[in-house]
Amino acid sequence: MLYSIIGTDREDSLEARMAARPAHVERLKALQAEGRLVLAGPNPAIDANDPGPAGFTGSLIVAEFPSLKDAEDWAATDPYVSSGVYKHVSVKPFRKVLPE
């Protein structure tokens, strides 16, 4: 089943985010290589692809996991969690409708 993982950044997280980004991206690439990643990306703090020093407010990942617990466990071990980038992470089942 698919799950949405929504991480919400703490204030002033940009420096910690950039430091943890390589490890975070490697985990996403592993999901992609397994054919389980639907999409992933950050939420810029301003209306721009490159928000510069404004940074980001969070991230969205949609990926396939065997169960909600597996998705929660995967999210809990993300480098953005362990480095304190995220102040909150929400994991919910996701049903893709479009595009078909």
Image (tube, rainbow, N blue to C red):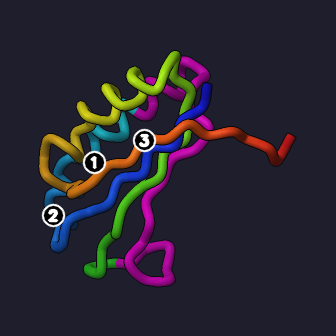
Picture quadrant of residue 46: bottom left
Of 24 and 82, nearer the camera is 82
Q: In this view, does 44 lie above or below 70?
A: below
Q: Could you tell which of marks 1 and 3 lies nearer the N-terminus?
A: 1
Q: Look at discs 1 and 3 and give the one toward the viewer.
A: 3
Q: Mark 1 points at which residue?
A: 21
In the picture shown, does residue 64 fall above or below 89?
above
Residue located 72% across and 41% down the image = 96
Q: Which of marks 2 and 3 is nearer the N terminus?
A: 2
Front disc: 2 or 3: 3
Q: Earlier in the sequence, mark 2 or mark 1?
A: 2
Q: At label 2, which amino acid type do we have?
A: Glu
Q: Which amino acid does label 3 sit on?
A: Val
Cα distance in 3D space between marks 1 and 3: 20 Å
Callout 2: SS? helix
Q: Which of 80 and 66 is in front in this view?
A: 66
First to last magenta residue range: 28-51
Q: Is residue 97 left or right of residue 15?
A: right
Location of mark 3 (residue): 91
Q: Which mark is residue 15?
A: 2
